[in-house]
Amino acid sequence: MSERRTLKLIHLASTLWFILCVGYILISALRQAGVRWWVIFSLSGYSVFLFLLLMSLYLFAIFRGISSSQKVKIEHPLTSTNYYRVLYVTTPLLGGLAGCLGMIGVETISQFLFGTSLGTLGATFLVWVILDPAIGLLEMLLPPASRKHRAQRLARAKALREKRQKDRERLLAEVLAEEKSVRNHWQKLLNPNAEKLAGLLTADRIDFKQAELEAVDIGVNAWQIGGLSCMRQLRDMAMAIARQRSKNKAVIDYIDLWWDGIGSWRNTSLG
């Protein structure tokens, strides 16, 4: 079994022990206050608060243990050592042992368990919440090499983020430029068909069957050129020309109906 896996298992065991001790302290305090058992463990009573508190402590311990194992050694010469990691993950167990030794000679088992739980809680709070963050802060502030390395690491991370941002912006600009180039190419290629469609839309008298056949041929050709995007551009061009010819009067959009079923084109009025 690897050293890191062993530390994780010890950390898990010590965290579970810590949760049990905190739960015992809370339950003992509630019992001393005269709270009945059925209230403590009722789903609508204190058990919900107890469960959320214990879960928060467990998640804090797991997260803190994971982050501690990922420290950069040059920035954290003490807390990144194996000795410190062992001390960190075994703190609840060591606190419980200290509590046991302190309770030697007590008369009742409840007092013994309460003292053991208090030792676990006190030691864990002292190391996990107070000493560990304080030591980590001192490691970053005091040694010049640590501060220099941290500044360099942050500078590299910032430069990497800026590079990725510039790469994304460059890629987006290339995509937009390519799309604009394609649309300009389509503009020239589709202009004759746009004129034909506009003529079909603005004609005073029109054979709708023949107009539909012509519009379908034009739509199929646009689909073959550039798919749905090309068809939409052609339709917009035709509608613009039709409105210009009719001097901005209302123009009925038959194209949407004529092209229904061509490729992935669907008549929006039917949906």
Image (cartoon, rainbow, N blue to C red):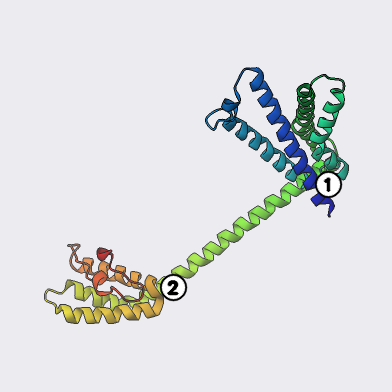
- Compared to residue 7, the image places residue 246 above or below, namely below
Q: Quadrant of the C terminus?
A: bottom left
Percent position of residue 23, x then y: 68, 30
Q: Residues within 10 Å of mark 2 (few under 14, many from 20)?
A: few
Task: Give the secondary structure at mark 1.
Answer: loop
| Lateral position of residue 97 relative to residue 30, left or right | right
| Lateral position of residue 48 relative to residue 112, left or right | left
Q: Which residue is mark 1?
A: 73
Residue 226: mark in rendering: none
- The structure residue drawn at horizontal position 79% and vertical position 37%, both measured from the top left corner, is 136
Which is more toward the observer, 143 or 239?
Answer: 143
N-term mark: 1 or 2: 1
| Lateral position of residue 81 relative to residue 193, left or right | right
Q: Quadrant of residue 216?
A: bottom left
Residue 182: mark in rendering: 2
Any part of residue 192 in sight = no
Q: Which callout, 1 or 2, points to the residue nearer the camera? A: 1
Any part of residue 47 in sight = yes
Percent position of residue 100, x then y: 84, 27
- The structure residue drawn at horizontal position 75% and vertical position 43%, both measured from the top left corner, is 12
- The structure residue drawn at horizontal position 34% and vertical position 81%, both measured from the top left corner, is 221
Q: At label 2, which amino acid type do we have?
A: Val
Q: Quadrant of residue 224?
A: bottom left
Residue at the left extreme of this rendering: 205
Q: At label 1, which amino acid type do we have?
A: Lys
Task: Give the secondary structure at mark 2.
Answer: helix
Q: Residues within 10 Å of mark 1 (few under 14, many from 20)?
A: few
Percent position of residue 236, x then y: 30, 67
Q: Quadrant of the N terminus?
A: bottom right
| Lateral position of residue 69 relative to residue 34, left or right | right
